Amino acid sequence: MNFNIAVAGNPNCGKTTIFNALTGAKQRVGNWPGVTVEKKSGHYTHSDNIFDVIDLPGTYSLAAFSAEETVVRQYLENDEADVVVNIIDASNLERNLFLTTQLIELGKPLVLVLNMMDMADEKGLQIDVDTLATLLGAPVVPVVGRTGEGIDLLKEKILRVSTEISMKARLIDIRYPRDIEIEIEKLHQLIQKNDVTDKHSRWTSIKLLESDQQTRDEVRLHNNCADILDQAKISINRIEVLFKDTGRATISSARYGFIQGAMRECVVESLIDSVDYSRQIDRVLTNRWLGLPIFGLFMWLMFKLTYDIGSIPMDWIDSGLVALMNFISDLLPNSMFASLLVDGVIGGVGAIAVFLPNIFILFLIIAVLEDSGYMARVAFIMDRVMHNIGLHGKAFIPMIMGFGCNVPAIMGTRILESRRDRILTVLINPFMSCSARLPVYVLVAGAFFPDNAATVIFSMYILGIIAAIGSGKLFSRTILKGMSKPFVLELPPYQRPTLRSLVLHTWERGYLFIQKMGTVILVGSVIIWVLGYFPTEVELDRDYGSERTTLAQYHDSQLADLESKFKKSVDQDRSGYHSEMIVYESSSSYLELHEQFQLLQEELTSEKSKQLYSLRQQEIGDITEQKWIGRVGKIFEPIVRPLGFTWRESVALITGFVAKEIVVSTYGVLFGVGEDVDEGSQGVISGLRSSGMTPLVALSFLVFTLLYTPCLATVAAIKRETGTWAYTFFSIAYSLGLAYSLAFGVAYFGRMFNWLS
């Protein structure tokens, strides 16, 4: 048989973790409010039955005030869910059970899951599961979602409720004060009499007393609605007179009264004083003065580890790619296909593959920060800063997600209730450095700032945050005036991330990047190769063949002269050597001369390799300049010349509009890393250094790459979330203008004050 299961619960209760544990679906799990913006689906099989599971957005109630509440309520009211699995944070029962009371009133079969039982134990809470199940009319399953403890029992309980075997799965009514119950009964009878709704009539009656606009609109669709709406108005007035409060507030208070009564029956606090470690840690990490510096330190450490640790496997991958290129070049005859394979595919995609260790390390560290609960603290820390641009700390959550990818980050703005807040956050989100920019940062910073690469990369991320906040302040005072709605940010307890969870989250994000390498980046690299391969015949002003021959002959003569001088010195030294006990070649005098000769020989050989490689790079540059790709770059070169860029940079930035990673692939093709690669060359890094780029130009290029027009996928996400091309084109134009202005400022003042010369 097939059963439909809906998973519902508050944000941060571990709902998506339970969903993953049930279905095995590889869904993203984060430890902050609003991680689940859209419902997700999966399935599992148990006792020859198929269970289709829907993961609903996290919500605190079914009031339908926010987008999350609306999605959950519409699904539960209108879709056929056989069982609702309500995930409850066992360490925060009172808050979580408020949603549970509404699910009970909705009349759906329930299975209640007490998640985070380990944290409840740490707080000294002892929960009588059986009594709680009796009071709430639903089976209660204690679990620890992050470790998988209790999941098998949960599947069994879902099966029993689905097949109506469980005796604890029964409908109960949350009892309100007598005067409220009288009014509920009046509306209940009218609704049933007039057959106004096919939903649970008691639920509809209560929502009318809460002045719920969605319920009113639904009742108005029926012909016999006047009597019901009139009675609702009379009942609300009577409740307000009797209880001196609104109907919604009175009913909410009654629900909390029921919850507190249930907790008195079921929850016992241990006499042993439990230590609230989360609160103690927060005294430091969220301190008014220490919070921001600590956040900055964590970010710096993240990029320091990303670069320093990642550089080791980077060298391994780079060496492997060089060996592969040389092998294929020797195996295949010189042809267009060989060039496509070596220069286009391996040279383009391989230029990105080198940076996979850095990207995976970055994702791993982000996963640690998310799963530990620190990311929610970052939103709290940034709340004061965000208020300066008319937003609140919750808006910083999608911005943090932008460190991974701007597309889901922009979609994540749906957690914000105000459309104005969503649009403002969407417009500033592309300034957050996504993982696609990281290969560009690592490449350029490693080439021109090898001793301070991590600091340079960290500076780019900080500059992106500053650009986002500064632009937000500007937008909030011009095109999007107003202040954000107030909100209360929930800080989840700190948790020890599990190895399984970290590996899962890191692989999910990394796998998406690998998929991108095999699709968008591969196609982009092939297109760049085509532009760089044709026309096949070009005329050069310089005879590089003759220059190479002359250069090789010059160095060979230098080496021959050096060898001749060494032999002459040895002969002179030997003539004055008189010892008969020791062979001259073993004497300290000979060994010293031989060591000097070897050092000079190595210097001359190294210099020969460098000059030949530099000449080869110049030849490749001149050839590429005559190709289609060079002609395109030359068209835009006058525009970027004030920034210190050449036609190569213009081509790289144009292709980066498709996907930022292709900037690196473009350089891989432009510098022909697949041709004549030897151990003395360093691929793209050597190409950059020999192309005339200086550290100042490199810094200007990094600033431009950080800020300029977002990639195509991000542009599509902006259009989808804002619903208009006006904001989309504005985002493109503004980011391009800001990138040009700041990059020009870096280049201009750098030349003026002779920085990084």
Image (tube, rainbow, N blue to C red):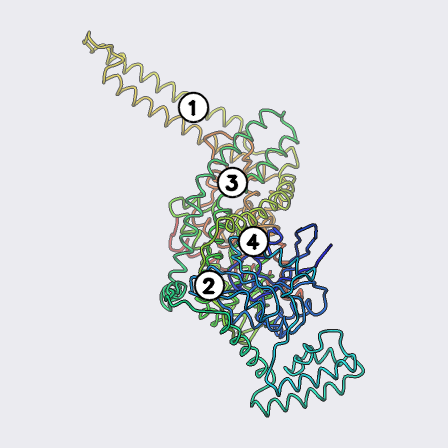
Q: Which residue is mark 4?
A: 639
Inspect the image, locate mark 4, and give the three-letter code of the amino acid beneath it: Ile
Mark 1 and mark 2 lie on one chain; the one further toward the N terminus is: 2
Q: Which residue is mark 1?
A: 554
Choose mark 2 or mark 3, whichever is in front.
2
Distance from disc 1 to disc 2, alpha carbons, whole Å, reads: 79 Å
Mark 3 and mark 4 lie on one chain; the one further toward the N terminus is: 3
Task: Identify which residue is drawn at 57% across, 37% down.
Answer: 347
Q: Which mark is residue 354?
A: 3
Q: Depth check: 140 or 301 in front?
A: 140
Distance from disc 1 to disc 4, alpha carbons, whole Å, reads: 41 Å
Mark 3 and mark 1 lie on one chain; the one further toward the N terminus is: 3
In the displayed structure, 535 sits above or below 363; it is above
How many C-alpha atoms fall within 10 Å of the one at disc 3: few (<14), some, or many (≥20)?
many
Q: Which residue is mark 2?
A: 120
* Quadrant in which the N terminus appears: bottom right
How many C-alpha atoms fall within 10 Å of the one at disc 2: few (<14), some, or many (≥20)?
some
Choose mark 3 or mark 4, whichever is in front.
3
